[in-house]
Image (tube, rainbow, N blue to C red):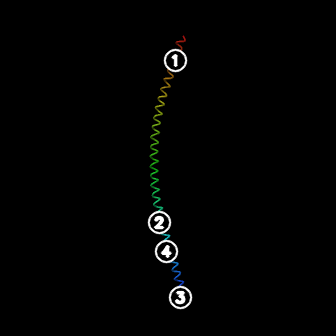
Amino acid sequence: MSQEQLDRMENMLTTLIKTVGTVLEEQTSMKNDITSIKEEQVSMKEEQISMKNDIRSMKEENNARHNEVMEALSIVRADNDLLWEKTNKHERDIGILRKLYEN
């Protein structure tokens, strides 16, 4: 083999080694990126679980408050009905008394 052919082969091997080195560096970088993405994904899943728990807690609290309001409204309705009945009775009694005093 001539010196020129040997130099060409050496250059080709050098280029090949550099290319392989670059590919390995990129592969390592990609592995690191994938690891980072997986860690972020785990973190996001934990946050999602936390958010679901918060939503569940808020729904339970909302239901409890709704029940309290409905109970209070029921009491107010009962009081209103009682007052309405008393008002009607008093109006009748006043009407009867007016008729008695007019005669």
Of the two numbered discs 3 and 1 in the rendering, the one whose residue sits closer to the viewer: 3
Element carrying mark 2? helix
Locate residue 36, reporting x and y percent: 47, 62
Disc 2 vs disc 4: Cβ atoms closer than 8 Å?
no
Give the Cα distance between marks 2 and 4. Answer: 17 Å
Mark 3 burial class by Cα count in 10 Å: few <14, some 14-19, many 20+: few
Of the two numbered discs 1 and 2 in the rendering, the one whose residue sits closer to the viewer: 2
Disc 3 vs disc 2: Cβ atoms closer than 8 Å?
no
Give the Cα distance between marks 3 and 2. Answer: 43 Å
Instruction: Name the amino acid type tagged 2.
Output: Asn
Give the Cα distance between marks 3 and 4. Answer: 26 Å
Mark 1 or mark 2: name the one nearer the start of the chain: 2
Element carrying mark 3? helix
As drawn, the label of residue 21 is 4
Q: Image quadrant for the C terminus?
A: top right
Mark 1 or mark 4: name the one nearer the start of the chain: 4
Instruction: Name the amino acid type tagged 4.
Output: Gly
Per the image, the residue denoted by label 3 is 3
Element carrying mark 1? helix
Mark 3 or mark 2: name the one nearer the start of the chain: 3
Instruction: Name the amino acid type tagged 3.
Output: Gln
Q: Residue at x 45, y 57 (%)?
A: 43
Q: Residue at x 53, y 84 (%)?
A: 7
Of the two numbered discs 1 and 4 in the rendering, the one whose residue sits closer to the viewer: 4
Residue lying at the far bottom in this picture: please name it.
2
Disc 1 vs disc 4: Cβ atoms closer than 8 Å?
no
